[in-house]
Amino acid sequence: MNFSIQILGTSSALPVTSRFPSAQVVDVYGKLILIDCGEGTQIQLRRFKISFGRIKHIFISHLHGDHYFGLFGLLSTYELLHREYDLHIYAPPQLRVMLTSHCSPVKVEQLPYKVIFHDIPADGGLLLDDKNFTVTAFPLKHKIPAYGFLVKEKQRKPNIIKAAISKFNLLIEEIVKLKNGQTIHREDGTVINPEQVTIPPPTPRSYAYVSDTLPTEDIIPYIQQVNVLYHEATFDNRNEQKALATYHSTAAQAAMIAKKAQVEKLVIGHFSATIQDFDRLLSEAQEIFPNTELAYDGMKIQIPFEKRRV
Amino acid sequence: MNFSIQILGTSSALPVTSRFPSAQVVDVYGKLILIDCGEGTQIQLRRFKISFGRIKHIFISHLHGDHYFGLFGLLSTYELLHREYDLHIYAPPQLRVMLTSHCSPVKVEQLPYKVIFHDIPADGGLLLDDKNFTVTAFPLKHKIPAYGFLVKEKQRKPNIIKAAISKFNLLIEEIVKLKNGQTIHREDGTVINPEQVTIPPPTPRSYAYVSDTLPTEDIIPYIQQVNVLYHEATFDNRNEQKALATYHSTAAQAAMIAKKAQVEKLVIGHFSATIQDFDRLLSEAQEIFPNTELAYDGMKIQIPFEKRRV
């Protein structure tokens, strides 16, 4: 029951050679979703050997080019690869308007697969309700409407204690009932309570993606206690004014949000092309929130299944 | 008086990790023009340390994504870099329609610099008449309207023989007249003919870019005897049928065109993502046209000034 993130791009808008613009793939139980799709995302998908045919859902945080200009190429490539199954795109409404206009760079109506657009409501909300996880959008504070995304595993059922299966000779239908919290009353008078044979399920795992934004505590209710928070840290402390002017965050500000939201781990990214001293950037964040890591293109983050049992 | 080409991308539409899609920069006397602008072109410009502020003219061969999807990011980056001077874009008309529509990914009217669109006429023609060179479009045979480009240095004036300057004590205004073919009649009765003191100028250098197309002899009048021909070679001989079906050329077909056009050198590129045996591809071309090279991302081609004197 994998829950992992692979970061494809960690730079901000201006091009650099060592980092691509924003994009990441979240794998929940083998289902892949793509969050943001900056220019060159399809090249990065190839580089990191991610089967992009497996991506069924794409979430676009906002319509600045470094977060979605890779979509045109990816949609075209899916056509060349003869994709047939639906592709769901969740984005601010303007993307749907653009891609369905007669001037669109990609003629979505003529693709061999169906593109299903889901406009992100102005105040965010639940976007995807999968069997095993949900994706929720929440508003950020940027120059244009922008959204963070919370990917959250659903509460799993309790686990049966292996030794109990043989001890009680549990049948499959009995196991299903016990996992659902039902008590078993056998014909021979035996009573088996769920508490006797199950252990509580692990706490649902969660991942939050926050880029681009001014630091804002408004997002804390959404990202509270997530296992991993990816937060933009476009600038260092020396450029706090620049961050403010461009509606971005510094590493220290990202760390403060992580601290207040009591997240487990913070990963910072979306670095300005002007940043050269990444150690400094990391130190500024770690002074406030020690469990911080610098994102890099190709970084893989596993969220272990067994953490934080209730 | 530099005349050089740097190739930024040599793959065709499907993404590969080692090659970017089509784009190249031609430098004529220090003036840079960009030919095609596939996804990630701005990253390649950075990688190869090309000052993209110096690009004033962009030529787009046709509107398949692997030849222009990098334009959105590049135009946006110019905005972030506070570009102020005009940018000329030469492309099939649909690009202008797209970029000036209200649904365009880049709002060209709101950019701090002016984008001047030049629609390529259906049958091609002279696009740019610079002081030192011209760029001419000529029709190719592809699924959609597509154009090759000929970049040709203008005929230079004859060179003054250095020894003649001191021998005749030539004044600057006399040198100008002599280079213009005028005879000097001095007051002391001395007559100096241009033939006495000048050597003929070198043959104008030229570069032709041909991608994407079926092999077609219709282009030979345009590319005849160019110094360097870049011709697409998407497939090898085994995939000749595939090349035909997709309106592309094989390496051997590209070589045949080079041979018939009596070019000096052939560079092949725009390789299919399926190609693994590049030696084979090169051999197939070299059997027909020995002076063939395989293009690679970052390849720099100098066209020497002194070649082929008349």
Image (spheres, coloured by chain):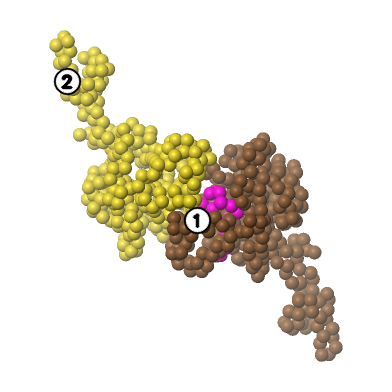
Chain colours: A brown, B yellow
Residue at position x 78%, y 78% from top?
A178
Name the residue nearer the viewer: A136 or B171.
A136
Labels 2, 1: one chain: no
Identity, as a three-letter code, of the amino acid under mark 1:
Met
The extreme top residue here reads B188
For the view shown, which residue lies furthest in the front direction?
Answer: B102
Q: Which residues are magenta?
A: A55-69
Which labelled disc corresponds to residue B183? 2
The reply to whether the magenta stretch includes residue A65 is: yes
Residue B85 position in % (x across, y down): 44, 35
Residue B101 visible in the shown view: yes
| Quadrant location, the C terminus of chain B | top left
Residue B140 at x, y percent in the picture: 30, 53
Q: Is residue A103 above or below residue A251?
A: below
Q: CA distance from mark 2 to mark 1?
A: 65 Å
Q: Position of residue B184 (x, y in %)?
A: 18, 17
B143 or B109: nearer the viewer: B109
SS state under label 2: loop
Identify which amino acid the numbered label 2 is placed on: Thr
Residue A98: which disc? 1
Say which chain tag 1 marks.
A
Above or below, B259 against A150 in this view is: above
